[in-house]
Amino acid sequence: MEKILKIIMFVVVTIVLGAIGSGLWERVLAPLFDNLVQYTNYLMNMCSNIYKDSVYREVGNGFREYSSVTMHTLILMVMPMSYWFATLQIRKLLRSESDDKLSSKFASFLVSKKGYYSLLLLTISLSIAIFISIAKIIYVNEVITYSFRSLNIVAPYLPDQEIENLKSRFYSIQSASDFYAFNERLLAVANKDHVHLPHIKLL
């Protein structure tokens, strides 16, 4: 009898839990899962659109030296770390030598604390100089790309003579004020004819 009661209780508990689980799935878990799937699809589509937009934005930039600039930037970034690693290795080798072999003043200086901080300061200075160089290279490339894109955008709204004049002004730029004057003319034409120029942050 007790065994039969256990079986009945097991069946009842199973039915109750099944009913609770079914109701919970239908009222809570199913809508939550649907929302999760929709949100995941939305994120995937958004990421896909962002990637496609970035690809075609690069297409709109036209041919430029972006890949070579990137490679040049990576090489410049590696230089300070390579230099610092090489100097540390040299210091280790010199420290492993006996004192009588460290007769050179330069070798003695390298293994000293003063030499360490001098090399550190030199590495930091080199890193700053390279960072400034990288920033300048990237910015110059962006401004050149912006200038040619903008010139091509406003070209249909200008007579041929003024287009040639703007090209001449661009190639004659010798200072920031020269570029600002060139850019102001592009912006004036764009505003007049209601066309949009590429976005850029100028110094």
Image (cartoon, rainbow, N blue to C red):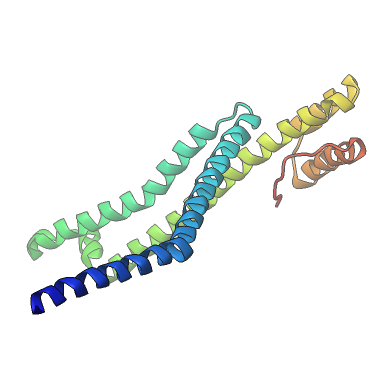
Q: Name the one closer to the observer, 112 or 5.
A: 5
Displayed quadrant of residue 188:
top right
- Residue furthest front in the image: 1
Q: Position of residue 19 (x, y in %)?
A: 36, 66
Using the rendered view, name the quadrant where residue 2 is placed: bottom left
Q: Is residue 182 left or right of residue 98?
A: right
Image quadrant containing the N terminus: bottom left
Judge whether 95 appears above or below 82 on screen: below
Question: What residue is rendered at 83% in x and 23% in y?
Answer: 164
* 86, 184: nearer the viewer: 184
Q: Is residue 110 above or below residue 151?
A: below
Q: Is residue 23 left or right of residue 62?
A: left
| Observer-nearest of 53 and 66 | 53
Q: Position of residue 20 (x, y in %)?
A: 37, 69
- Image location of residue 85, percent across then percent down: 27, 54
Would residue 28 appear left or right of 179 to someone viewing this image?
Answer: left
Residue appearing at x 19%, y 58% in the figure: 104
x then y, percent, for residue 52: 56, 36
> At 38% from the left edge and 63% from the top edge, which residue is drawn?
22
